[in-house]
Image (cartoon, grey):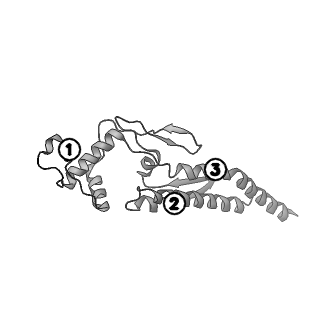
Amino acid sequence: MKTNNLIKYLDSFGRYVVKQARTNLSKGDKNATSDLYNSIGFEISSDSKGFTIQFYMDSYGKFVDKGVSGTDKKRKYKDYSGKVVPSPYKYKSKQPPTSIIEKWIKTRGLKGRVDKKWKGAGNRGGQFITDKAFAFLIARSIKEKGIKGISFFQRPLELGINRLSNDLLQGIKEDITEVLKDIN
């Protein structure tokens, strides 16, 4: 059976989810280098069992999407069915690598300072600290508080799936109609 309309619909579904995920990602502050933004894509494949649409992105995208629970705070996210569920990822004993956070600090142009209210500051309050020390403090905070999931991919997937049923049936109907026309 010809499946041109079905493939055409799956392609538009994939493009819709990718476009919306990229839009959601660019709205927040999670897109410092646009590496994750550029890595989002999809592929359609078929075999004897049917069609598969597979989405892909950089590996850390799942942590940004679903969040990561910290040692002190549990994180949740909204999945593609609209349910709020706990993040499957969590920090236990290790914290994020400071080298990656240091790179992020430099990309953002951030500078850390000694807190004037900190008891150990003495007369040094307000002075800049090194990027390495600043990155360590951020990494420790991330380990404790976790990373809030922004559902940048889950939400478009939910919206796309909700639209899928009607449009998919229309695509199959058109393919069957074309096959019946060819028979006559």
Tag 3: amino acid: Ile
Which quarter of the picture shows residue 5? bottom right
Tag 2: amino acid: Thr
Q: Tell me the quarter of the image containing the N terminus.
A: bottom right
Determine the residue positioned at 43% across, 39% down. 75
Which residue is disc 2 drawn over?
A: 23
Placement of 55 over or under 181, stated as above or below: above
Count neighbours of disc 3 (C-alpha within 10 A) and say few if under 14, some if 14 to 19, many if 20 or more.
some
Tag 1: amino acid: Lys
Cα separation, mark 3 vs mark 2, equals 18 Å
**First along the sequence among labels 1 and 3:** 1
Count neighbours of disc 1 (C-alpha within 10 A) and say few if under 14, some if 14 to 19, many if 20 or more.
few
Q: Position of residue 184 (x, y in %)?
A: 88, 64
Which residue is disc 1 drawn over?
A: 117
Q: Residue furthest left?
A: 123
Q: Does dot 3 land on a helix, a strand or a loop? A: helix
Which residue is disc 3 drawn over?
A: 161
**First along the sequence among labels 1 and 2:** 2
Q: Position of residue 155 (x, y in %)?
A: 55, 50
Q: Which mark is residue 67?
A: none
Which quarter of the picture shows residue 141? top left
Instruction: Kindly report which numbered mark, 1 or 3, lies closer to the viewer in this rendering.
Output: 1
Q: Does dot 1 land on a helix, a strand or a loop? A: loop
**Contact between labelled residues 2 and 3, with CB atoms less than 8 Å apart:** no
